[in-house]
Amino acid sequence: MSPPTRSPGLRLVDRLRTEGARPATYRAGQVVLEPASDLRRVGIVCNGSVTVWRVSPKGRQLAAASLREGDWFENVFPTDSQERTIVEADGPVTVAWLDIPAFRRLAQRHPQILHDMIQRQLSRLAAVQQRAAQTALDTVAGSVALAILQMAEQEHATDLRVTHEELALRLGTVRESVSLAINKLRRAGALAPASGRKRLISILSLPKLQQLAGARPEAH
């Protein structure tokens, strides 16, 4: 009978152990790393997953990243934000720990491993930036929607003669952000498609615009 096939996670543990890594297991909810007080080291997730939590000044925890097999985290390169960061196990998880000398040896002996780790890190950062950009756009879109609602109420009209630049000045932002937000509102069906008239913004669906602005529809 052939021996049972070892899982990719166990094979990763074995490989890293030969490079001086020290595997450790954690249960769900257990703190894996507190960068502000923990030893300077690199952790590589071999199986399971962990969540990186950022702690706000008010103590609220915000999930910053979810790391799975092959992902890594560290406190080797200190930053000002590390004192407000915690890494926590989502469930049973195995982490292979490398101290600084072991991490340097791994980088020297197996540059491809280091390259892959950096690529995964860059991919995560790109995803975070994309989410941040989308959140910022959603915020601007909500502000633009609310401004259009207020103008429509003041003018008792659904066709407004206003430029993107004028809306930007009203909101304290830049024209490009307003233009992106208006395009988003048009795709959502809240505003009518662009017409040949440069200064015209038309409300297509008042309920949708109210929803996107976070405003409550008026009772009739």
Image: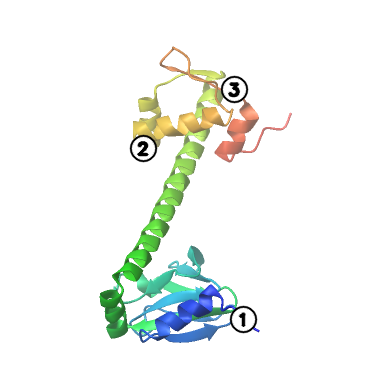
The vertical placement of 207 against 83, above or below, is: above
Answer whether labels 2 and 1 touch (C-beta < 8 Å). Answer: no
The vertical placement of 141 against 203, above or below, is: below
Q: Residues within 10 Å of mark 1 (few under 14, many from 20)?
A: few
Q: Quadrant of residue 205?
A: top right
**Foreground: disc 3 or disc 2:** 3
Secondary structure of residue under mark 1: loop
- Residue 142 visible somewhere in the drawing: yes
Which residue is denoted by mark 3 in the rendering?
A: 204
Q: Residues within 10 Å of mark 2 (few under 14, many from 20)?
A: few
Is 38 positioned to the left or the right of 88 in the image? left
Is 146 positioned to the left or the right of 128 in the image? right
Which residue is denoted by mark 2 in the rendering?
A: 172
Q: Earlier in the sequence, mark 2 or mark 1?
A: 1
Secondary structure of residue under mark 3: loop
**Foreground: disc 2 or disc 1:** 1
Q: Label 2 is placed on what type of residue?
A: Gly
Q: Nearer the viewer, residue 147 or 109?
A: 109
Q: Nearer the viewer, residue 158 or 55?
A: 55
Q: Label 3 is placed on what type of residue?
A: Leu
Answer whether labels 1 and 3 touch (C-beta < 8 Å). Answer: no
Which residue is denoted by mark 1 in the rendering?
A: 4
Q: Label 1 is placed on what type of residue?
A: Pro
